[in-house]
Amino acid sequence: MTRARTTATAIAALCLFSSQAFGLTAEEVWDKYETLLRTDADTPVTIASRTKVGDTLSINGLAVDYADDDVSVAYTIDVITLTEQSDGSVRIETAETIPFDLTFQDGDTPVSMQLEYTQKDAVVTVSGTVDRMNFDSQTPEASVTLGELKGAEDFSDSEFTLTLRDMVITSNVDAANMQDASFKAAAIAFDFAMRDPATTDGFEGTMIANNLAGSFKGNADALAKLGTSDGPLPDLFLEYGFDDISGQMNFDIEDEKFDAVYAAGSSKVTYDANAQFISGVSEVTDMSMKFNIATLPVPIDVSMGSLGGGAVFPTAKDTRSPVEYGFYLRDLKLNDGLWSLFDAAGVFPRDPITLELKLTGDAELGFDLLTTDPEDWEELENPGKIYGLNLDTLLVQAVGAKLTGSGAFTFDNDDLETLDGFPRPMGSALFNLVGANALLDKLPQTGLIKAEDLLPVRMMMGMFTQPGDGEDSLKTEVEVNEQFHVLVNGVRMQ
């Protein structure tokens, strides 16, 4: 997490700076930018020379070298010019190529990467005041390319290039470095290849997406506070999405070759965080994937109407907060060849498959999530408390059957003896199953199982279900009472 956010922060700062400035004079712009370059107060930022000729301030030989226990990032910019315009704005021009050196540990092995950020014809217009600066930047093309990879022995022969075209960033930054930005790009392309030089095993592929769009609100310095003891995380909001996604991958592993082609209508990610909670939501729509695998007798062709999920969980210590987790896969369709692998006779309905789950509740952490090292979580004496958990949605719909469920449970955190350290639950859940008997009747027709082998299943259904409200409908109610008796349809099981 540390190396990802550090590199992302550095590249984001360069993207912004490649087409942004931070004041109405060249000196004010440079002073502000030098502050933003520091991931923390100890980050070394040096320059070889600084000269002012007329309205242009030139910064030569800028070097930034950030390091912590997990990762080090170093990069240089040969030339930066900041030119004051007649209308009070400042125009920024930087070197077209900016090299990065990234080093981190992979277990006991140090890994180093050389990256190259390239921008072409970046243009910026900056207006406003020192306390509130407005930026309008345009970059026809920007890319990040892997130059060299050392230490990752299995895939040392690797390459990738990430390219954005017609990138536009508009933002404003106040005196406290809080940013409110929006960004977009007409297209983004990712070309990659990873190979093991000892065996030639590896894979390669491309990904292309159109209409990248997103927004960011917060302080970029907040990213550096994750996993530290520097205090609570300031408010941070990020969302982005793509349209018309497509790509392909080719694999060659242990002399087995196969390829995949994928596409999606849209993709969106939202991330929101503050001192009390973190939430994240993602969704992909109209997704399709095709696989050709030599060892399979048929190609695999699947599509989904939507795939997504999200979570909300607390970050602050000793604060009772809502929690949430959700996942859904809607309208999954399989090609006939794939269905035929287990249902050659077409016994089952081949309707789209849907899975949905949503859990909500409230809980309390016994530690500060953002300032505690994840390696120490297992050693915590008081990880926290759970007060309630609700099953808001459960849906499994496939091969003509449909399972739904809902329920709510509370937890007694004063009773940690009944369940050996876990709070005692109390509540109930109701489950409904439609089409189960028809499904069992059809199973023997597929040849996968004999009718007599299903007798134990039918007996268990008889023991733990009762007739539902419609034809071929069953229901089950599970209850845990105050005495920690477990009842199924009113019959005590424990």
Image (tube, helix red, strand yellow):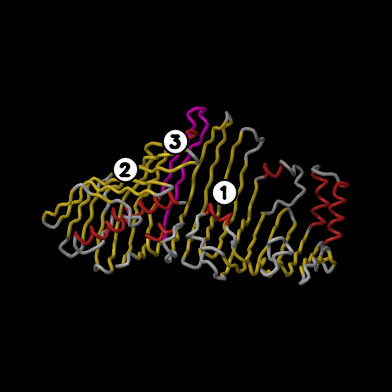
Pick the front one: 38 or 122: 38
- The circle on residue 151 is 3
Which of label 1 and label 3 is nearer to you? 3
Question: Residue at 61% of width from left, 47% of height from top?
Answer: 302
User: Which residue of the protein is positioned furthest toward the front in this rendering?
Assistant: 381
Q: Which span of residues is magenta-colored? A: 188-214
Q: Residue at x 35, y 65 (%)?
A: 178
Query: Which amino acid type is shown beneath numbered disc 1?
Result: Ser
Q: Position of residue 219 (x, y in %)?
A: 37, 63
Q: Secondary structure at mark 1?
A: strand
Does the magenta stretch mainly form a helix, a strand or a loop? strand
Q: Is residue 452 left or right of residue 272?
A: right
Which residue corresponds to mark 2? 99
**Residue in view at x 18 percent, y 48 percent:** 49
Instruction: Tell me the element at label 3.
Output: loop
- Element on which disc 2 rests: strand
Q: CA distance from mark 1 to mark 2?
A: 37 Å
Q: Is residue 46 left or right of residue 384?
A: left
Q: Are marks 1 and 2 in contact (CB under 8 Å)?
A: no
Residue under circle 1? 288
Of callouts 1 and 3, the N-terminal one: 3
Q: What's the CA distance linking mark 1 and mark 3?
A: 36 Å
Q: How far apart are labels 2 and 3 at the CA level?
A: 19 Å
